[in-house]
């Protein structure tokens, strides 16, 4: 890795998606919203905010989410893609376990805040 100072930004569609992920990720990771439709002005603002950060796209698995992902992919061609499963009600409706699995798959485990009940399993208190 080497560059510890490299910041990471995840782009989601709405503020519910953002607050959903915020609970699972440390504050080292910035989470930005597209708030639905993307026009040139909004894309420019996003680009300015994100700057040189490493970008991850995490949009809903529906037609509008795919459309937004397509536009974001053109704007951030080097972005990593994170997907939620079809049938979940978007990122905000995805169970924590599945979100965590996808974040791990994207290589973000060092930033994940694991739910407490999981940490308590399998660790006998002596």
Image: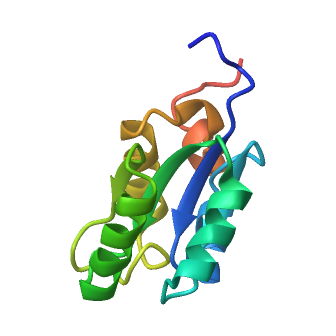
Tell whether 64 sits left or right of 11. left
Q: Nearer the viewer, residue 61 or 50?
A: 50
Count of labels in the image: 0
Is residue 23 in view? no
Q: Nearer the viewer, residue 51 or 59?
A: 51
Query: Which residue sits at x=61%, y=44%?
Result: 114
Query: Which residue sits at x=52%, y=69%?
Result: 12
Quadrant in the picture for residue 72: bottom left
Tell whether 1 sits left or right of 19. left
Query: Which residue sits at x=41%, y=71%?
Result: 94
Quadrant in the picture for residue 45: bottom right
Q: Which quadrant would the N terminus be assigned to in this image?
A: top right
Residue 36 percent across, percent down from the top left: 50, 88
Tell whether 125 sits left or right of 74. right
In the figure, 82 relative to 8: above or below? below
Tell whether 54 sits left or right of 66. right
Residue 84 percent across, percent down from the top left: 32, 65
Residue 54 percent across, percent down from the top left: 56, 40
Furthest residue toward top? 2
Scheme of image coloration: rainbow
Q: Which quadrant would the C terminus be assigned to in this image?
A: top right
Quadrant in the picture for residue 86: bottom left
In the figure, 14 relative to 11: above or below? below
Is residue 91 in view? yes
Q: Nearer the viewer, residue 28 or 39?
A: 39
Query: Which residue sits at x=54%, y=63%?
Result: 11
Residue 33 percent across, percent down from the top left: 61, 74
């Amino acid at each position: 890795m080497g560059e510890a100072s490299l910041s990471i930004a995840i782009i989601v569609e709405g503020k519910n998606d953002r607050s959903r992920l915020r609970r699972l990720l440390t504050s080292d990771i910035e989470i930005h919203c597209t708030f639905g439709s993307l026009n040139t002005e909004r894309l420019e603002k996003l680009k300015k905010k994100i700057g040189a950060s490493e970008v991850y796209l995490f949009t809903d698995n529906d037609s509008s989410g795919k459309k937004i992902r397509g536009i974001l992919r053109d704007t951030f061609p080097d972005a990593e893609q994170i997907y939620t499963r079809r049938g979940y009600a978007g990122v905000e409706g995805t169970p924590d376990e599945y979100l965590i699995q996808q974040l791990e798959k994207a290589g973000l485990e060092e930033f994940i805040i694991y739910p407490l009940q999981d940490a308590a399993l399998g660790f006998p208190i002596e």
